[in-house]
Amino acid sequence: MDVSTFYALFSATCFTLVGLWWNVVQSHPEWMREPPLRRIVGGIYPSFLLPALMGLFAQVGGTEQPQIWRVAFIALAVVGCLCTLRLLTRAGARGDHFVTWQQAGAALLYLLIAVVGAFPELAGHIGLRPIQAEALMLIALIALIALIVLGHALVWRFMAGEGRPAEET
């Protein structure tokens, strides 16, 4: 598959997931009533939106003008990493190890995306063009779950009710 086609499909899929997530959120107004849960629910939004935006910038810059996608990937990855670390501290404080590991993996992935954006020559060490390495990191990283899959797993936990705080008796 050509890289621009990949990013077009990837970006469209992520934007669709943003819309689907907000439909899920609308069907659970109780999630918005508690500030800690509201922050977690809101924190899932960037896990779909930021990769979607990265995909758009990759299409705009492509291989002809890599500085466009590189700057965007660095900036969006820094935002993603900061948002994820903020969620990580909240999940850790609640003792939710499942979410903690997912968020730690996402933070690491965002960091690696920013590093390759800043130092694209690193992709050559594994025989890839930088834009290909970034695409692979948006999908999967050895021993870590893909960024989008992390978002899917969190969505599933909330849809299945596992993300809600225990009912007080």
Image (tube, rainbow, N blue to C red):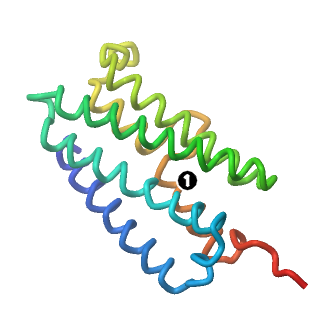
Q: Which of 44/15 is in front?
A: 44
* Amino acid at circle 1: Leu
* Residue 61 vertical placement versus 155 (above, below): above
* Residue 164 vertical placement versus 115 (above, below): below
Q: How many marks?
A: 1
Q: Which of 16/3 is in front?
A: 16
Q: Mark 1 falls on what kind of element?
A: helix
Q: Position of residue 68 (x, y in %)?
A: 17, 32
**Residue found 42% across the figure and 41% down from its top:** 79
Q: Which residue, given by chain and number where applicable, does mark 1 sit on?
A: 150
Quadrant in the picture for the N terminus? top left
Q: Position of residue 148 (x, y in %)?
A: 46, 53
Q: Position of residue 11 (x, y in %)?
A: 28, 55
* Residue 72 vertical placement versus 32 (above, below): above
Farthest residue in the right direction?
A: 169
**Residue found 47% across the figure and 83% down from its top:** 26
Q: Residues within 10 Å of mark 1 (few under 14, many from 20)?
A: many
